[in-house]
Amino acid sequence: MTAPVLMVVGTASSVGKSVLVTALCRILRQDGVRVAPFKAQNMSNNADVTPDGLEIGRAQSEQAAAAGLAPRVEMNPVLLKPQGDRTSQVVLNGRPAGLLTSADFDRRAEFWPHVTSALDTLREGFEVVVVEGAGSPAEPNLYDRDIVNMAVARYAHATTVLVGDIDRGGVFAHFVGTLALLAPADRALVRGLIINRFRGDPVLLEPAIRDVEARTGVPVLGVIPWIDHLDVAQEDAVVLERGSSGAAERGMFDVAVIQLPRIANFDDFDPLAAEPGVRVRYVERPEDLGEPGLLVIPGTKATIADLEWLRASGLDEVIRAHAARGGAVLGVCGGMQMLGERLLDPGGVEAAAGSATDGLGLLSLETTFVADKTTRRARGHIAAGRGHWSAVRGHSVEGYEIHMGRTTPTSTALDPLLVLDGHEDGAVSLDGRIAGTYLHGLFTSDAFRRTLLRSLGWRDPGASGSAADRREREFDRLAGAVREHLDLTFLRDALGLTAP
């Protein structure tokens, strides 16, 4: 039997679609329903790797975890990874498939069969598929090339709900305007409205709710409250604009992450931010760096372009100065590439063919960009024994790699940071203060994370629990808040599900 589809579309980007789909996946799983997430096309540099080495959007991986599943490539068949304002790398069915520019943005005919095939596969294997849209479904300039919003809803005859973010303001106008712009057949698929991120007493909204229901003929199914400090992986770096984790308090251990323009996999640092007494902040200006206990240069989808941005902003100099004072620096993926001496691009993967770019010169490394992309899950241990890394030598770690570069040492005196699946990864400086790795997810290892933080000066209050347990608790907390405020009976009836 082909599974019914619940489609979640939004009045705009970043209204909470990803998190709501995560909640619905968790709720249905709690109720004994075999459920899977799906997003036809994702545009994000936050990615994950499936157990079979294929790349999908990080949000769909998080939604899968909420549903109790390992991530699968069918959950996100098309992933667009922005490299600039007008260029994105295409990842099709988990593998690189060229570049997409603004001049050739319409590749619907190419992508659509992969979208429908992936969705069909999930519908045959599960009892419900919860589908996430992208941006707004009511963009007239994109309507004829849509493969992610109402085209999917039409194909699947989906029960569709429209989500709006009341914290931004204007949510009722957004509802009315979105529905007015939809074609009549698409508007008929929208069965309910959901108000998201409300702070206050929902009773105050009742007159406006009655008005929008009368204007549109579509019921409001729930008013979801603002959920403080929700530790669930997000799809877009726009969430970083809402501030750093925690308040600045005396005695807190300070982690500064450089907020690169094309930052990727920024949720690498969520386990750090979740530790009591640790503050993670994202830095864009030299004057904001200060004296962090750990400075991190994160991953990026465009290493050379973001390295040029570092230089133009002056952050390169303050990073070098921090290192010269004995400060700890860690580069992850593209961040490690930047820490090296040279970046070579013989094939024009990131820059002009044959170009060579100087790195920050803090590690004796050289990176050569290649067309073949490395995507794999990996596990291993800390091999470095210098400086604060000596405290964690031998600790087990695991995560995943996503990169298009090959990095090699230019000095025999350099030690590898890790050994992953039998091969050396990354590097550590002679004094142990500067380190780099290709491994994303490094900080999810509880024993490693806490021991490293303690060696850097963190005052461990103890008894903070594991990252895995905390993730499960956050899924349940999110599901509980949504369950309390959403008309799930209406949705179950619309999907033809029996009561739990």
Image: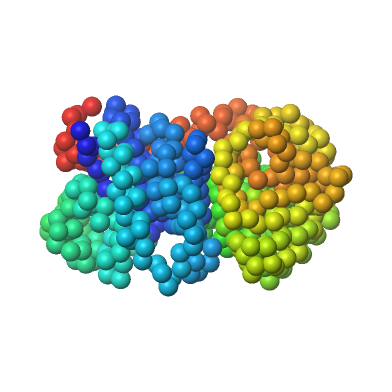
Q: Is residue 107 visible?
A: yes
As displayed, is residue 261 above or below residue 379?
below
Along the line of sight, which residue is nearer the eye, 364 or 96?
A: 96
Residue 100 relative to residue 320: left or right: left
Residue appearing at x 31%, y 67% in the figure: 142
Residue appearing at x 35%, y 56% in the figure: 111
The percent position of residue 487, horizontal first and vertical second, equals 22, 41
Residue appearing at x 42%, y 39% in the figure: 72
Q: Is residue 476 visible?
A: no
Q: Quadrant of residue 4?
A: top left
Q: Quadrant of residue 303?
A: bottom right
Residue 447 relative to residue 184: left or right: right
The percent position of residue 419, horizontal first and vertical second, equals 71, 35
Residue 7 relative to residue 472: left or right: left
Check the picture and name the quadrant holding the N terminus: top left
The percent position of residue 193, horizontal first and vertical second, equals 23, 52
Q: Quadrant of residue 459?
A: top right
Check the picture and name the quadrant holding the C terminus: top left
The percent position of residue 46, horizontal first and vertical second, equals 51, 51
Along the line of sight, which residue is nearer the eye, 16 or 316?
A: 316
Residue 258 relative to residue 361: left or right: left
Q: How many labels sit on residues? A: 0
